[in-house]
Image (cartoon, rainbow, N blue to C red):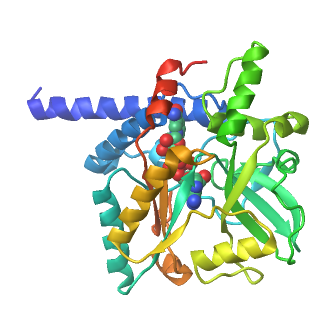
């Protein structure tokens, strides 16, 4: 066998191994709420797979994790079809990748674009359906098209309005999370009761939302930040900035640490500022999300199979304190 045939075979084998490993890790993370490796390790393997698939697009199969928005659905909950898909997001791991994103978007739109920069809350994506202003259903992202009905558990969240101040009918999207202090308290209680502590606040939140008994969910004291919506006749802001104003106006909770930026320098300054504030925030964030602000431009840019072309998630390095937790034991 020639050296190039050998490389070809090795790449093929590595690609198959990566797909299998990543699918297993994703199952443990999304379905069992019990990750066995850190997010950084997962992201590294994922990028390796993306690299191999870019070299050999003919090897891409529909069961590849790169071709899925979310993940498998677990049994036990009613299924809910979302009014519009709930997408994942493309990632950037350094400032060159952020620059490439800004360049690409600006070139494609062909005029001045503004960017809404937001904290990337490390929780669980949720979808809240309001009809005539009333909260009628809440769901997980699930596989992106179909989620799990977790209405009763979401109703335990004090900051989630059961009735909005205006009779809008649409789906509102955001993140459910557990604050750092509640997480510490929950784990202390678990240790006192001889239970295994949660790996991190995100897992505690994900598990909380999947409780069969809403009383158990209530004990996790979840909270929410909303940052998205399905636009229709009753709800159609012209920009992400206006979306936040409208969400707040109807009574929905948003994260105040956001900023409209007009160029790469401003985006970089925002990232630096948030990274500095990160350890002092009362909730976990794992990065910054940069979104094209103008809805008309968002629509022009559209979506890939997995993610909007008008947004990118810049992921932070793991925090030192967090790394220590990650190193402890991922199998508990
Ligand atoms: P993602 O975490 O890369 O980013 C998209 C998500 O960010 C959205 O779905 C939304 O829930 C969230 N988000 C938070 N704040 C937001 C904001 N202001 N605006 C918009 N969205 C916001 O994508 P993902 O598909 O949810 O998850 C993939 C990630 O999960 C991987 O990168 C990896 O880190 C982690 N993962 C880890 C394991 C593991 O075993 N450790 C397994 C699978 C996935």
**Image label count:** 0
Q: Quadrant of residue 88?
A: bottom right
150 or 52: nearer the eye?
A: 150
Question: Does the image show residue 206?
Answer: no
In percent of the image, x 87 and y 77: which residue is there? 167
Front one among 184 and 131: 184
Asked if residue 112 lies left or right of residue 259, the reply is left
Q: Is residue 34 left or right of residue 60?
A: right
Pick out the residue farthest to the bottom.
111
Residue occupying image coordinates x 54% and y 57%: 119
Residue at the top extreme of this rendering? 194
Q: Quadrant of the C terminus?
A: top right
Q: Is residue 107 left or right of residue 315?
A: left
Q: In the rendered view, tell whether residue 130 sits above or below residue 295.
A: above
Is residue 80 something one can see in this rendering? yes
Where residue 34 sits: x, y (%)?
62, 28
Determine which quarter of the picture holds residue 99. bottom left
**Is residue 84 or residue 170 the one in the foreground?**
170
Picture residue at 53% right of the left edge, 29% below the top = 24
Q: Where 75 falls versus 54 (above or below)? A: above
| Left or right: where 97 falls relative to 202 | left
Residue at figure coordinates x 50%, y 51% from the top left: 277
Q: Position of residue 10 (x, y in %)?
A: 24, 29
Q: Position of residue 154 (x, y in %)?
A: 82, 49
Placement of the N terminus among the 4 image quadrants? top left
Vertical relation: 145 (above or below) 16: below
Residue positioned most to the left: 2
């Amino acid at each position: 066998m020639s050296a190039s045939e050998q490389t070809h075979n090795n790449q093929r084998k590595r690609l198959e191994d990566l797909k299998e490993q990543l699918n297993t890790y994703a199952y443990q993370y999304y379905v069992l709420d019990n990750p066995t490796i850190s997010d950084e390790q997962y992201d590294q393997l994922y990028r390796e797979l993306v690299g191999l698939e870019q070299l050999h697009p003919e090897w891409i199969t529909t069961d590849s994790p790169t071709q899925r928005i979310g993940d498998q659905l677990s049994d036990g909950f009613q299924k809910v079809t979302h009014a519009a898909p709930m997408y994942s997001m493309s990632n950037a791991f350094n400032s060159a990748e952020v620059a490439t994103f800004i360049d690409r978007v600006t070139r494609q739109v062909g005029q001045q674009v503004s960017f809404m920069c937001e904290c990337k809350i490390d929780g669980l994506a949720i979808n809240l359906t309001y009809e005539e202003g009333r909260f009628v259903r809440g769901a997980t992202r699930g596989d992106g098209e179909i989620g799990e009905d977790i209405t009763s558990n979401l109703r335990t969240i004090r900051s989630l309005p059961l009735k909005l101040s205006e009779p809008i009918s649409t789906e509102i999207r955001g993140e459910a999370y557990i604050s750092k202090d509640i997480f510490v308290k929950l784990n202390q209680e678990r240790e006192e009761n001889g239970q295994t502590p949660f790996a991190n606040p995100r897992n505690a939140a994900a598990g909380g939302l999947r409780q069969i008994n809403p009383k158990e969910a209530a004990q996790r004291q979840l909270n929410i930040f909303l940052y998205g919506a399905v636009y229709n006749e009753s709800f159609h802001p012209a920009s992400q900035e206006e979306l936040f104003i409208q969400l707040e106006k109807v009574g929905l909770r948003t994260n105040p640490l956001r900023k409209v930026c007009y160029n790469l320098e401003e985006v970089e300054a925002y990232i630096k500022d948030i990274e500095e504030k990160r350890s002092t925030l009362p909730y976990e964030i794992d990065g910054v999300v940069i979104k094209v602000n103008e809805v008309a431009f968002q629509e022009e840019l559209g979506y890939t199979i997995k993610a909007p072309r008008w947004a990118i998630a810049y992921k932070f390095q793991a925090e030192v304190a967090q790394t220590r937790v990650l190193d402890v034991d991922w199998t508990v």
